[in-house]
Amino acid sequence: MAATVAVENLNPKVLKCEYAVRGEIVIHAQRLQQQLQTQPGSLPFDEILYCNIGNPQSLGQQPVTFFREVLALCDHPYLLQRDEIKSLFSADSISRAKQILASIPGKATGAYSHSQGIKGLRDTIAAGITSRDGFPANADDIFLTDGASPGVHLMMQLLIRNEKDGILVPIPQYPLYSASIALHGGALVPYYLNESTGWGLEISDVKKQLEDARSKGIDVRALVVINPGNPTGQVLAEENQYDIVKFCKNEGLVLLADEVYQENIYVDNKKFHSFKKIVRSLGYGEEDLPLVSYQSVSKGYYGECGKRGGYMEITGFSAPVREQIYKIASVNLCSNISGQILASLIMNPPKAGDESYASYKAEKDGIIASLTRRAKSLEDAFNKLDGITCNEAEGAMYLFPQLSLPQKAIQAAKAANKAPDAFYALRLLESTGIVVVPGSGFGQVPGTWHFRCTILPQEEKIPAIISRFKVFHEAFMAEYHD
Amino acid sequence: MAATVAVENLNPKVLKCEYAVRGEIVIHAQRLQQQLQTQPGSLPFDEILYCNIGNPQSLGQQPVTFFREVLALCDHPYLLQRDEIKSLFSADSISRAKQILASIPGKATGAYSHSQGIKGLRDTIAAGITSRDGFPANADDIFLTDGASPGVHLMMQLLIRNEKDGILVPIPQYPLYSASIALHGGALVPYYLNESTGWGLEISDVKKQLEDARSKGIDVRALVVINPGNPTGQVLAEENQYDIVKFCKNEGLVLLADEVYQENIYVDNKKFHSFKKIVRSLGYGEEDLPLVSYQSVSKGYYGECGKRGGYMEITGFSAPVREQIYKIASVNLCSNISGQILASLIMNPPKAGDESYASYKAEKDGIIASLTRRAKSLEDAFNKLDGITCNEAEGAMYLFPQLSLPQKAIQAAKAANKAPDAFYALRLLESTGIVVVPGSGFGQVPGTWHFRCTILPQEEKIPAIISRFKVFHEAFMAEYHD
């Protein structure tokens, strides 16, 4: 092996970066999956159940038909000239594809677009945001991205100058944030969500952490809020959102609002309110608060992770700063056009009166209802086990139960050189094939242990998962009983 | 406007980054295009001709039918169950779509894939590389990416620790490299291509620049080669490639081989040889040389820029370094699946005997033959003008003519606070609607002036472009005659 490049001489920011959602346990799971293929029967289970990642279609969720009809027609516009398609595609998917193609210069779905994305699609998205919020949105504020992640990286790249620039991030957090801050060489300033109040966000704690960071010379530049929460599944109360916005304005922070789970809500007493709506409801305008809102086609009821579509809506930045944002976007030319089209579709799905509406609504409602039932079943099952407590999954795609581990288990983990929750998750995988992510990958109050489990396995598999989980957990607790 | 975020407190690496391909002149062109729409007849031309970027389908090139058939079927697999498709799709596109879907776990084109891309597609790509080179390729070495750019950024992020880490880059260069090095805070170490030998790469100059950089304390980590060249259009001689590989091995440099134009060759006396093939032909193995080869669906005869597909093949890196590469890739989850599928298709297009083969070959040959004619017409036209000399476009999608500007033009540019070639390009745009990129955006020998012009406008427009260009150029030269 050429010695020129070795781990010792790589960028230390890369070495520092961690991403548990696809980390050690998942790599081990992939090895076990190969083993199941090459040596069937060699493990105490016959399939790997990936509950580590919000990837619904990998577990059997079907795509929404209307969206895929439009994508197929846009990919191969020749079809639109043929009569046979009338029996294969809905009338509104045909008219929508024609309308989308007409909005693309030269109808060229194979061309690089404007670096913010195709203008006509951004118009559609802006109209969707306006309709959602009741406040106007502008196509010039939309940057279409390959999923939400590149937009998060872009803002970190823009704001972080060195290790003295800090970003307030909820703990537990989605590790994209810690990874991106590490890769860009900044300081993650943690604020803790309160597990005992259903993962509530308490401004007093955020303020304390901000002041503490400032006293250490950290220039805190932005606050990340994930709503609905990942990995924690809570939906912020509207009052709480007002407090967050006022806090960011008063403290001069950019508000980075991760709102990719905006259509994943499973309780009647909570609603999604975008931070853009909250900001405007307070009467704040462009001059008051820089705000970035992230949306993705990967989540919601659509779950189109593989299409890598998404956008960020940026408001409250000066023209010269926006030029810099545009410049970084332009270095990567543009996001993929299928993802751009899909982002426009999720913000403007079929409406009552459209041919597809009834079937579209049945698909959408069926998915959300099933996710609601799965969330409830898993939450109830976890709460029935000794040594596990689990908050309600109000939204998103996850549960984040707390483990009360016996001292002997903690010692065994230490002997194996693992965090206790990683030790537990590894044993769970090896006993049951169920893949969860240890809480240590997301951050947690020191001395507490958790794991993140998605609610995404298909509904018919949930009872078996619960029973396998129960058998494992009880055996584990018995083995390490204090 | 909130004062919190201002250009003065942004990441200085972002401010330093430049990307001329979508820079000032292009933004001005977009404004003129809007003016043409809102006030037709208000400009001395009636359309903007974008010759600034290698974006063939934006100028009317049609996508290859077979590729789009397969993409549409994979987007909406329900079609595969319907008999009507037999009259709409070729038999081999149907069988190929089925084969691709079977290689995707759960046939889920809407799921995140393995962070390197779907294994079955990487197998296809590895087989395509093996067949191209006559040396084995391995699916584990392939990382599928959203176009080639993210792979370039990834390697810069990995290798650059600080401003003392240098990357050897050809001048003129594709500004992705200077932009990425600036964004990651490294040092661009230039080596000059020799215009008088058809943009030849001279190892003696590279060695001189390397030693010069080292004497300044720069740790030179990698050498970028773009073959066929961008913006220069040359195809490296095989002998030259051997020298480059030996040089990288002897000097302990990573070889970053930008090979995205591998299927854009317009002369009979040159062939594309991948650096992987050259390395293996020399008998060098994994231990001798770290090599990254980039390929993209955006270029070639396919020109599918909007699909954002591509891959990098990495060889010669140790397992721990590869783990770091995998980790960075995993933070962004995966590249878009349509782009992944398309990357597998371009590396395994229809073969003789397949139903689509004749029409596929006709489309492919037609595009390449037309590009060859367009390159030659534009090259001849430029060379006929006083004050312009232009090397042969052997490959890629560009000509990079040199301008001999009169002193008065240089003074006028200085008075307008522009580089002379930027001044020329701006005047060209305002007189003719033709958008080219000034040589200063790519780098050039100090005191020389160039522009990059794509060969991509549709063939029927080339005569008009040439005549408009000629009228402008002669008037410009007359105006500033010394």
Image: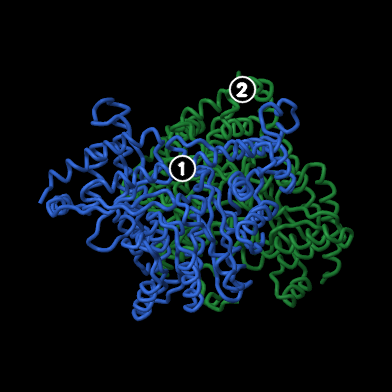
Chain colours: A blue, B green
**Which residue is rendered at x = 24% and y = 28% of the image?**
A42
Q: Nearer the viewer, residue A245 or B361?
A: A245
- When asked about the image quadrant of residue A280, the answer is bottom right
Q: Nearer the viewer, residue B12 or B206?
A: B12
**Which x, y percent locates residue B423?**
74, 68
| Element class at badge 1 | loop
Which residue corresponds to mark 1? B112
Q: How many marks?
A: 2
Q: Nearer the viewer, residue B359 or A108?
A: A108
Residue B188 visible: no
Measured in 3D between alpha carbons, the distance from the residue under mark 2 to the one under mark 1, in whole angstroms, is 27 Å
**Which residue is rendered at x = 32% and y = 46% of the image?**
A380
Residue A452 visible: yes
Pointer 2 with pointer 1, Cβ within 8 A: no
Mark 2 neighbour class, 10 Å CA radius: few under 14, some 14 to 19, many 20 or more: few
Residue that lies at the very extreme toward the left in this rendered image: A482
Residue that lies at the very extreme toward the front in this rendered image: A269
| Element class at badge 2 | loop
**Which x, y percent locates residue A252?**
49, 77
Which circle marks residue B82 in the picture? 2
**Which x, y percent locates residue A106?**
75, 45
**Which residue is rendered at x = 34% and y = 63% of the image?**
A197
Q: Taking B391 as reference, is B276 left or right? A: left
- When asked about the image quadrant of residue A224, the answer is bottom left
Chain ID of residue with mark 1: B
Q: Disc 2 residue type?
A: Arg
Which circle marks residue B233 in the picture? none
Chain ID of residue with mark 2: B
Mark 2 vs 1, N-terminal side: 2
